[in-house]
Image (tube, rainbow, N blue to C red):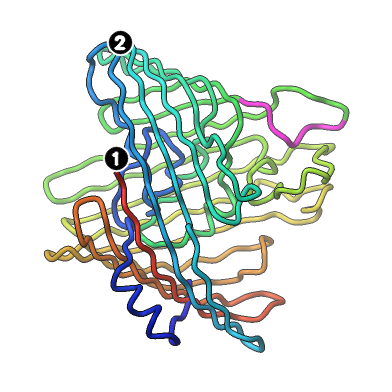
Amino acid sequence: MNMFLKSTGMVCMALAVSSQAFGMDEVEELKRRLDALEQRSAVSAEPSGEKKGSISFGGLVEVEANYQDTEGAESTTDLTLATFELGVEARVNPWLSAYGVLLYEQGESDDRFIVDEAYIRMKSDSSPIFAEVGRFTQSFGRFESGMISDPMTLELGETKHHASVKAGYEQEGLLASLSVFKGDVQKTDENEINSLVASIDWAEEVGDFHYGVGASWTNNIGDTDGLQGEDDSVNRQTDDLVGGWTASAMAGYKSFELRGEYLGALDKFSDGESVGRQPAAWSVEAGYSFDAPFSLAVRYEGSDDFDTNDKRYGATLGWDVADGAGLAFEYQRADNKGAADSDTFTMQLAMEF
């Protein structure tokens, strides 16, 4: 998201930085948030086998440097430890596993480690039915991306850090689930398990062609991170919960892929900080992987009744410099409503282990 036109020192750093923006595995069922590392890169916690008592660890480090030029203001530069993740998977037997992810993001959550996910998963290879119990990112939206920056759909719709119960069906490209949790946004004078998230995704491959569609729904979109914010002093009680929905589609041929997603509230908020608004966001992205270890992604996105961004567009060039490590450069232009427009250039070095 940034336009880097200044110091040669940062340029040199770019040549030493790397991004898994195009392809690190995520912790199974993990938010597709760090990816969609994005894609943001994430920790790999795929079942490592059926050996009783098996345990595996993984991790991710992302370092970012950026330059931002905002109209009518002084330009700014920054260097951050964008992500540090530690993940673990423990398999007790062929149908029972536990997963955990510790996450640090500089400038987020009071600059400390948080338990991003910790849950128990029950699924037998002989059955498509599964259940998960614990803390995990909700299956509301897909948010897949090959860029360093998160899409607006994720900024608006990601919901995490709730103890939840999920049941679902997973077989031959079809994934459907229903989860329930106690949201921070509650009806007036209530304190109950009150939030639902239902999702369904289907994907297919036919030779060199692949495609898929998905949709999800929640009865409480006000509980997303983008709408409730981080100020615990804010009153999060409401007279009426507002629902939300998402729809996504993707299609690809060989190394090319096109994907799009829409996420929005089903009605206007009747009270609270979002009163009178009906937030929505959309994103369209195309990506291509070259024969050399390079990838390119371009994205165009927008939002309504959410934050100051009206439209954003940009591109990310990624380079897999080594197995598990990559360098990426991103430019992004933000056209804002009621605020100055900006150009941002970001460099990211990412490595998984």
Disc number at residue 93? Answer: 2
Q: Residue at x 66, y 60 (%)?
A: 306
Left of 61 or right of it: where is 183?
Answer: right
- In this figure, what is the number of numbered marks? 2
- Magenta-span inclusion, residue 293: no
Left of 173 or right of it: where is 201?
Answer: right
User: For numbered disc 1, what is the local secondary structure?
Assistant: strand
**Alpha carbons under labels 1 and 2: distance apart:** 29 Å
Q: Residue 232 location in percent, x, y?
A: 78, 43
Question: Can you say whether 202 is above or below 19 in the image?
Answer: above
Question: What is the magenta range?
Answer: 181-188
Q: Residue at x 53, y 23 (%)?
A: 134
Q: Quadrant of residue 73?
A: bottom right
Disc number at residue 238? Answer: none
Report the amino acid beneath label 2: Asn
Left of 303 or right of it: where is 126?
Answer: left
Write down the residue under mark 1: 203
Q: Nearer the viewer, residue 307 or 46?
A: 46
User: For numbered disc 2, what is the local secondary structure?
Assistant: strand
Q: Residue 206 location in percent, x, y?
A: 15, 44
Report the amino acid beneath label 1: Ala
Q: Nearer the viewer, residue 190 or 24?
A: 24
Q: Residue 18 location in percent, x, y?
A: 31, 62
What main secondary structure does the magenta stretch of the protein show?
A: loop
Q: Residue at x 79, y 37 (%)?
A: 240
Q: Nearer the viewer, residue 281 or 101?
A: 101
Mark found first going from the N terminus, 1 or 2? 2
Label 2: how many residues lie within 10 Å, few (<14), some (14-19) or many (20+)?
some
Q: Quadrant of residue 27?
A: top left
Label 1: how many residues lie within 10 Å, few (<14), some (14-19) or many (20+)?
some
